Amino acid sequence: MRRSYLPITATPFAAGPHYREILPSDCGLRNYIRCFWGSEKPYRKMTMPKPELVIPDTCADIIYYADYTDNKIIAGFCGPNDRSFYAYDPFEAGHLVSTFCIRFYAWGAYAFSEDSLSDTINGFFDVQSRFRWLDCQLQKRLFEMKTIRETAMFAQQLFVQQMLSVRQNPVVDSAVDALLFHRGTLSAAGLAKEAFVSTRQLERLFREYMGITPKKISNLVRYQYLWNDIIKNPGFQILDAVEKYNYTDQPHLMREFKRYHTMDVKEARRYACLDVANIQDDGAYNWYDLPKGGM
């Protein structure tokens, strides 16, 4: 169930030299990491790009901005978001730059973290505060690797080696499985019942492991399933979605969608299709696997 859940961005058709997504080829790792993403290779930044809409995608990211001109790397860990915002990269015009990022599922980052994810929602933190083991090995190699595929393969190797010591909790795992099985339609009490714990205990565990409450992550998972339907289903009907995702009525669905997306369904679809001209020939979505056996 976890590997079939693929949350998407506000512009899921985006593809090109400045943005590429690569799926981990290791099946076990796909339970924790949604994808690696970033620029295909270093490029010369010529103009100030438009700000990008970032929607809640039930994920947490480690982001590396590499400036080859200044020989400088800016790194940070972004906790899960429960609201949309517009993002800019920090690069100066004329500099040779690249971006490399690791997008974890909200419940996947903790497995590789060296500290709690409590209070990380909507926050940006030093990578070393929670992922020192990774940063010490990855950051020093970033300038050597010239393509995102090369960097992603190296990062995947580090994560696969770390899989032997990942931090897990059977209660959280059970609750996440129920969360995805029911597509975010269960209440916090319903999730706690599925995991055989009290609601208070589940809230404490979710704050520790994800930095977010069961109620919020449930609403966000439902929103992401809805957004996937809006984008992927040519025959999408709002009234069908109201019943499918257990919304009270159509206004309830539309209010919650706009709350997370900052625009209504029609505007969101139009915004998502701005990059349709850049769709790759081998698929409508910019998802590529790392080559098998490439470690």
Image: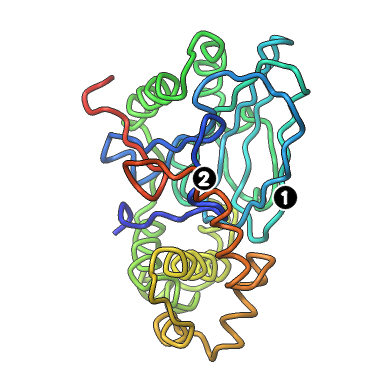
Q: Quadrant of the N terminus?
A: bottom left
Q: Quadrant of the C terminus?
A: top left
Residue 202 visible, this orientation: no
> Taking 2 as reference, is 97 above or below it?
above
Outermost residue toward the front in this view: 277
Instruction: Say which residue label 2 marks.
Output: 14
Mark 1 falls on what kind of element?
strand
Outermost residue toward the bottom in this view: 249
**In the image shown, does 262 or 245 lie closer to the viewer?**
262
**Callout in the foreground (2, 1):** 2
**In the image shown, does 45 or 158 lie closer to the viewer?**
45
Q: Picture coordinates of residue 70 (x, y %)?
A: 74, 10
Residue at figure coordinates x 32%, y 30% from the top left:
290
Residue 183 visible, this orientation: yes
Q: Along the horizontal axis of the image, is 92 left or right of 131?
A: right
Q: Along the horizontal axis of the image, is 84 left or right of 131?
A: right
Instruction: Say which residue label 1 marks.
Output: 86
Mark 2 falls on what kind of element?
loop
> Could you tell me the amino acid type at mark 2?
Ala
Q: Picture coordinates of residue 212 (x, y %)?
A: 59, 59
> Could you tell me the amino acid type at mark 1?
Tyr
Residue at figure coordinates x 35%, y 23% from the top left:
157
Q: Quadrant of residue 213?
A: bottom right
Q: Earlier in the sequence, mark 2 or mark 1?
A: 2
